[in-house]
């Protein structure tokens, strides 16, 4: 207590920020629910009950039932696993690609920088959602394909961020000192510069999870994402659209879950950003 | 200034080339062939017939050759013929010159995106400015909260909610298609009113995400600008607050918004797949969805390319807007 280590400073600022804490709690709850899905879901999500088709919320089925009589709450609890895993794996892929390309571009400059920056410009000009849709439809909508394709189309922001960090950090004394004692390029890139640019990368990764969750649910909503009977929030919403005239609960609850999840990641990301270093506010924007 | 724009324009050509190259390879290298669909529809198809089909569409040639053939035609704005059963040219399905403007798919999508961009500007900028000038007031806190929640809102969910509320329960608005069955028999005013009713929800939904992003951005940009020395000087000269805000601060605060808008056009176009699908609007997004489902390579490539051209054109427009707003760039 009372020591001004960076970690303590971070915690003190983070604790003060009520919204950030709320975001953290949302993410934590989501994580716990996803892991404990078999224990917390009241029914088996795939159990078909033909006597209780499309029933509105009541005591036995607090969020109603779908067109096959399956319990919506149980399907949403199991669906949280999809959201969580797609978010993390897709962003993991995007972050690694972005870090490597950003480092190459920022550290070496010159020819590789021009090539990578042009590549980023090209990727940013492709209507990404069109491309994701086409590729997933062609290679088949498995959850792994979805994660990989979202990851492969979301790395541009991270790459730009890491490049900018490298451009400023590579001229600093500690890097010049490392060079002077003969450290290899690889060592300087990873042990000296990358380590010091992790804060903004972490923040943008948390914010990107929110984006990946939205893309996955949009794909599943269009019927090109996670395929039934595997439950996902997006494909329950798809049923909601088909039954829009008679079953509002199929549309309202899964969407609310997506909204709260995305909000949670956004609040957490911005909270971490402001707590690590309030000055970052300007450099890490979406 | 003309030189700068010309340079930016020329730079777009290699970018567009790169986009088509990457898209073409990704799409054609994905496992499976469009002829699989034909055989699914007709299980009796013989291997010979399948080969004949592949030959007809040049699918038997190496991919570099296929790309070369595609590129050669595209220079003449010919995207080839669609794989669909009627084999119409891609261009005709996107922009059918025989039909009225409102029934051409590219026009429908372009119109909705343009209108939602206008809506974004007209609403987001005033909200951003007023919440910045009233920083930390109740109004600012409310708009900031609403905007933050709006930012996380999945647009397709918003669409469903609005459809349930205004379509299913209140019966105020139609929930699908671009026009009513009796559209052609209506007088001109009635036709406009009919279109307006059908477009209200789609435009609102497609504008919503941008609305949240732009007003948030406008607020922070404005907050930055009103702390600058030249704003203090303007106030010290005794200029009325309105003049200070709208003549001195506003134009400088607008610059980042212009850049942001240019960059967000790709997302806006991508979003048209979602809302055209929900509202059953016969635009380019809906056509793209159908083409993807039937592995219609020429259609998919055609729409991807047109989407990319629109995105690049948007970026160029942003550059021009930037120049109009900032005389410092014009001078260079």
Image: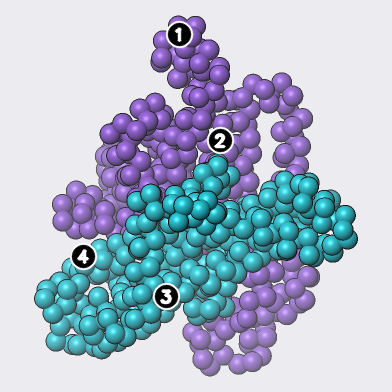
Camera-side mark, 1 or 3: 1
**Co-location on one chain, circles 2 and 1:** yes
Camera-side mark, 4 or 3: 3
Local crowd at mark 4 within 10 Å, few (<14), some, or many (≥20)? many
The picture places residue A3, in percent across and down from the top left corner, at: 51, 53
For label 2, the SS is helix
Numbered badge on residue A248: 4
For label 1, the SS is loop
User: With respect to residue A105, does A250 lie above or below?
Assistant: below
Local crowd at mark 2 within 10 Å, few (<14), some, or many (≥20)? some
Query: At x 23% / y 85%, what residue is drawn?
Result: A43
Quarter of the rendering occupied by the N terminus of chain A = bottom left
Q: Earlier in the sequence, mark 4 or mark 3?
A: 3
Q: Which residue is mark 3?
A: A82
Q: Residue furthest top?
A: B238
Q: Which residue is mark 1?
A: B239
**Co-location on one chain, circles 4 and 3:** yes
The picture places residue B285, in percent across and down from the top left corner, at: 47, 58
Evaluate if marks 4 and 3 touch, with contact meaning CB atoms under 8 Å apart.
no
The picture places residue B34, in percent across and down from the top left corner, at: 59, 78
Pointer 4 indicates a residue of which chain? A
Gap between marks 2 and 1 measured at Cα: 25 Å
Numbered badge on residue B324: none
Local crowd at mark 3 within 10 Å, few (<14), some, or many (≥20)? many
For label 3, the SS is helix
Decide if residue B302 is in sight here.
no
Q: Which residue is mark 2?
A: B256
């Amino acid at each position: 207590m009372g020591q001004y280590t960076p970690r303590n400073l971070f915690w003190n600022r983070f604790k003060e920020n009520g919204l950030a804490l709320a975001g953290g709690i949302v993410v934590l709850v989501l994580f716990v629910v996803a892991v404990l899905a078999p224990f917390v879901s009241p029914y088996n999500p795939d159990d078909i009950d033909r006597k209780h088709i499309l029933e509105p919320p009541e005591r036995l089925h607090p969020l109603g039932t779908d067109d096959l009589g399956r319990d919506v709450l149980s399907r949403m609890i199991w669906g949280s696993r999809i959201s969580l895993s797609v978010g993390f794996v897709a962003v993991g892929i995007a972050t690694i690609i972005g870090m490597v390309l950003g480092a190459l571009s920022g550290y070496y400059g010159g020819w590789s920088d021009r090539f990578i920056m042009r590549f980023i410009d090209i990727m940013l000009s492709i209507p990404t959602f069109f491309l994701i849709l086409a590729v997933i439809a062609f290679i088949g909508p498995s959850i792994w394909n979805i994660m990989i394709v979202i990851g492969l189309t979301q790395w541009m922001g991270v790459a730009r961020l890491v490049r900018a960090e490298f451009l400023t950090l590579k001229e600093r004394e500690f890097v010049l000192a490392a060079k002077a004692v003969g450290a290899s390029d690889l060592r300087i890139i990873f042990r000296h510069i990358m380590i010091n640019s992790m804060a903004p990368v972490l923040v943008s990764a948390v914010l990107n999870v929110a984006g990946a969750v939205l893309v996955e649910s949009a794909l599943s909503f269009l019927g090109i994402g996670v395929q039934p009977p595997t439950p996902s929030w997006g494909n329950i919403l798809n049923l909601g659209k088909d039954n829009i005239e008679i079953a509002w609960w199929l549309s309202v609850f899964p969407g609310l879950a997506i909204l709260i999840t995305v909000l949670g990641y956004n609040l957490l990301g911005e909270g971490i950003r402001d707590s690590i270093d309030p000055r970052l506010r300007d450099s890490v924007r979406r | 200034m003309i030189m700068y724009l010309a340079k930016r324009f020329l730079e777009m050509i290699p970018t567009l080339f790169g986009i088509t190259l990457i898209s073409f390879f990704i799409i054609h290298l994905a496992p499976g062939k469009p002829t699989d669909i034909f055989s699914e529809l007709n299980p009796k198809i013989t291997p010979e017939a399948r080969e004949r089909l592949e030959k007809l569409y040049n699918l038997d040639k190496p991919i570099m050759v296929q790309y070369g053939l595609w590129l050669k035609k595209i220079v003449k704005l010919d995207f080839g013929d669609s794989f669909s059963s009627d084999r119409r040219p891609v261009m005709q399905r996107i922009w059918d010159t025989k039909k009225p403007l409102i029934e051409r798919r590219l026009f429908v999508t372009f119109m909705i995106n343009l209108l939602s961009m206008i809506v974004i500007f007209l609403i987001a900028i005033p909200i951003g400015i007023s919440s910045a000038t009233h920083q930390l007031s109740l109004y600012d806190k409310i708009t900031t909260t609403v905007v933050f929640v709006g930012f996380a809102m999945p647009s397709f969910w918003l669409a469903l909610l609005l459809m349930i509320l205004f379509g299913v329960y209140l019966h105020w608005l139609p929930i699908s298609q671009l026009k009513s069955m009796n559209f052609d028999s209506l007088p001109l005013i009635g036709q406009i009113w009919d279109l307006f009713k059908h477009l209200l929800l789609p435009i609102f939904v497609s504008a919503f995400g941008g609305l949240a992003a732009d007003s948030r951005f406008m607020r922070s940009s404005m907050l930055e600008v009103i702390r600058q020395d030249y704003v203090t000087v303007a106030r010290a000269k005794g200029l009325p607050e309105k003049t200070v805000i709208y003549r001195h601060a506003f134009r400088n605060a607008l610059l980042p918004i212009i850049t942001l808008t240019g960059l967000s056009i790709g997302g806006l176009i991508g979003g048209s797949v979602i809302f055209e699908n929900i509202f059953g609007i016969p635009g380019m997004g809906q056509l793209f969805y159908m083409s993807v489902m039937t592995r219609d390579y020429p259609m998919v490539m055609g729409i991807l390319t047109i989407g990319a051209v629109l995105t690049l054109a948007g970026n160029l427009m942003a550059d021009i807007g930037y120049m109009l707003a900032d005389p410092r760039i014009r001078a260079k």
